[in-house]
C-alpha cells in the first residue's frame, strides 16, 4: 500500500470519529450513570462525564434484588420471541405472494401494507384495547403477543418484498418444472437463498417489539405481567423522584440482548438490508 493510499484511508477513518462519538455517547453516559454512587450522582459540583468517587454496583443490586426486573425481562423475551416468530412467518408468506404472484391490485395492496406500518401506535391502542378485552386477555402478556404483530407484520412484509425481488425467478421456476409445488419451491429454494433478508427482518422485528412501550403500558399493569420497558420506568419513577442510577442500570441490562444479536448477525443484517434497499 502506497503512502498516499494509507493517508487517504486514515483520513476517511478520522472523518468517522465524530459520528462514532455521537452514536456511542448516550451508551457511555448511561453506563457511567449506572456506576456512580448516589452522593456523586446528585452532587451538582461533580464532573458529569467522569467517575471521581469510585464506581459502585449498588444500583444493579437494587435493580436485581429489590425489583422484579428478572421477571420483567423474562416477560419481554417471551413476548418478543413469539411476536417476532409469528410476524416473520406471516410476513414471509405475504411478501412472497406480493413479490411473485400476479393478481388484481397487487401493487396497491403492497403500498397499503407499507402505509399501515406508518400509522402511529398512539392511534391504534384504543381500538386494539377493545379487541384485547373481547379476547379476554386484559392485563396479560399474551395481549402483547396478539397486538405486536399488527405493526411487525407490515414491516416484515415490506422489508422482505424488496429482498424476494432480488432472488431470480428462474431458480424456483426450474424447481417447479421438476415437479415441486410453489410452497415447496418457497421452502426449499427461495427461503435458503433469502436467509440474510429473513435475519434482517427478524432483527428489526425483535428490536421493535423489545423496545415497544405504549402497548405494553396500556395492556399490562400487574408486576408479574409487565415487560422490562414498562417495569423499569413505572417502578423506578415515583412522582417527582427518579432513581437515576437504577434506571440507567436497567437500560444497560435491557440493551444487552439487542447488542448480542446484532454482533452475531451483523453480516446477515447488512447484506439483507442493502439487498432490499438497492432493489
Image (cartoon, grey):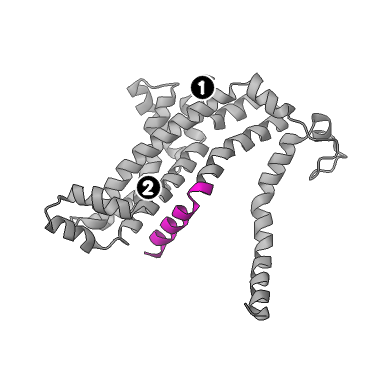
Task: Determine the main secondary structure of the stretch shown in magenta.
Answer: helix
Q: In this view, does 200 lie above or below 135?
A: below
Q: Is mark 2 on a helix, strand or loop?
A: helix
Q: Which mark is residue 130?
A: none
Nearer the observer, 37 or 180? 180
Nearer the observer, 129 or 268? 268
Q: Is residue 264 above or below residue 228?
A: below
Please name the residue shown 80% across and 31% down the image: 37
Label 2: how many Cα within 10 Å (few below 14, some 14–19, many 20+): many
Please state the horizontal and vertical placement of residue 137, each as a whole percent of the image: 38, 22
Q: What stretch is highlighted in magenta?
A: 263-279
Could you tell me which quadrant the N terminus lies in? bottom right
Number of numbered labels in the structure image: 2
Please state the horizontal and vertical placement of residue 157, each as a whole percent of the image: 34, 49
Task: Find residue 273 and report its image quarter.
Answer: bottom left
Residue located beneath label 1 in the image: 221
Please name the residue shown 53% across and 29% down the image: 73
Left or right: 34 with respect to 85?
right
Q: Residue 156 carries which label?
A: 2
Question: Residue 264 lies in magenta, yes or no?
Answer: yes
Q: In this view, does 111 lie above or below 44?
A: below
Amino acid at each position: 500500500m502506497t503512502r498516499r493510499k494509507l493517508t487517504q484511508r486514515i483520513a476517511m477513518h478520522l472523518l468517522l470519529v465524530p459520528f462514532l462519538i455521537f452514536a456511542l455517547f448516550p451508551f457511555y453516559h448511561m453506563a457511567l450513570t449506572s456506576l456512580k454512587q448516589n452522593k456523586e450522582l446528585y452532587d451538582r459540583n461533580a464532573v458529569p462525564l467522569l467517575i471521581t468517587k469510585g464506581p459502585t454496583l449498588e444500583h444493579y443490586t437494587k435493580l436485581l434484588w429489590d425489583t422484579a426486573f428478572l421477571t420483567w425481562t423474562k416477560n419481554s423475551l417471551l413476548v418478543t420471541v413469539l411476536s417476532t416468530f409469528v410476524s416473520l412467518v406471516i410476513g414471509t408468506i405475504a411478501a412472497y405472494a406480493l413479490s411473485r404472484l400476479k393478481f388484481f391490485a397487487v401493487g396497491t395492496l403492497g403500498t397499503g401494507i407499507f402505509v399501515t406500518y406508518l400509522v402511529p401506535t398512539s392511534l391504534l391502542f384504543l381500538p386494539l384495547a377493545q379487541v384485547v378485552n373481547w379476547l379476554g386477555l386484559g392485563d396479560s402478556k399474551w395481549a402483547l403477543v396478539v397486538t405486536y404483530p399488527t405493526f411487525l407484520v407490515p414491516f416484515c412484509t415490506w422489508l422482505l418484498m424488496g429482498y424476494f425481488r432480488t432472488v431470480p425467478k428462474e431458480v424456483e421456476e426450474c424447481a417447479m418444472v421438476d415437479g415441486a409445488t410453489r410452497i415447496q419451491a418457497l421452502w426449499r429454494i427461495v427461503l435458503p437463498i433469502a436467509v440474510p433478508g429473513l435475519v434482517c427482518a427478524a432483527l428489526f422485528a425483535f428490536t421493535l417489539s423489545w423496545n415497544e412501550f405504549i402497548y405494553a403500558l396500556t395492556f399490562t399493569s400487574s408486576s408479574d405481567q409487565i415487560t422490562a420497558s414498562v417495569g423499569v420506568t413505572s417502578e423506578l419513577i415515583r412522582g417527582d423522584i427518579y432513581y437515576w442510577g437504577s434506571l440507567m442500570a436497567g437500560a444497560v441490562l435491557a440493551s444487552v440482548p439487542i447488542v448480542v444479536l446484532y454482533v452475531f448477525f451483523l453480516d446477515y443484517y447488512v447484506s439483507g438490508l442493502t439487498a432490499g434497499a438497492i432493489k
